[in-house]
Image: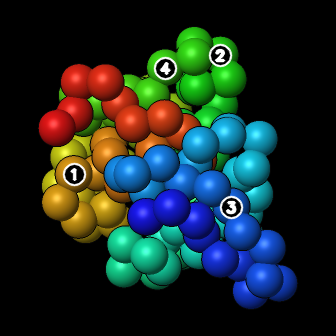
Amino acid sequence: MSDLLLPDHRRVPLDRDGYLRKLDDWSPQVAEQLANSVAVNMTSAHWEIVEVLRRFYQESGLSPGMRPLVKLVARELGAEKGRSIYLMKLFPGNPALLASKIAGLPRPTNCF
């Protein structure tokens, strides 16, 4: 991938893995397009996770891998949502990678 084309015909540059090149390019509209590109239909449950991730990144400068993401979500949203199975239903495959991508954050360094 090189660019994300938005409905208003603006282009947002992506790296070779589909992550935003510039964090400042993120917006809810960009998140929707990124989600569509990985076959995720955003719901309020998805947005909760995206918001938690973005807050965490603003505070720490880190994109969490899977284990830290599970702990973070449990702390912020409760034990029911802070489970890997819950996150995998929302973001199939690797929730930490997909959620970070949609949230406009860098790829978590400890995810492959």
Disc 3 or 1, which lies upstream in sequence? 3
The residue nearer to you, when weighing 8 against 39, is: 8
Residue at figure coordinates x 54%, y 54% from the top left = 14
Disc 2 or 1, which lies upstream in sequence? 2
Which of labels 2 and 4 is toward the front? 4
The residue nearer to you, when weighing 58 against 9, is: 9
- The residue carrying mark 4 is 62
Q: What residue type is labelled 1?
A: Asn
Query: Considering the numbered disc 3 on the image, is that residue within a helix, a strand or a loop?
Result: strand
Residue at the far front in the pictured view? 2
Q: Are marks 2 and 3 in contact (CB under 8 Å)?
A: no
Which of labels 3 and 1 is toward the front? 3
Residue 91: in sight, yes or no? yes
Is 105 above or below relative to 5? above
Q: What residue type is labelled 3?
A: Val
Residue 80: in sight, yes or no? no
Residue at the far top in the pictured view? 60
- The residue carrying mark 2 is 59
Query: Considering the numbered disc 1 on the image, is that residue within a helix, a strand or a loop?
Result: loop
- The residue carrying mark 1 is 94
Label 3 Cα neighbours within 10 Å, binned few <14 / some 14-19 / many ≥20: some
Is 9 above or below relative to 28? below
In this picture, residue 91 sits left or right of residue 99: left
Q: Are marks 2 and 4 in contact (CB under 8 Å)?
A: no
Q: What residue type is labelled 2?
A: Glu
- From the top left corner, tell me how far across and down residue 1 is, in percent: 43, 64
Tag on residue 12? 3
Query: Considering the numbered disc 4 on the image, is that residue within a helix, a strand or a loop?
Result: loop
Q: Are marks 3 and 1 in contact (CB under 8 Å)?
A: no
The residue nearer to you, when weighing 112 against 80, is: 112
Give residue 38's quadrant in the image.
Answer: bottom left
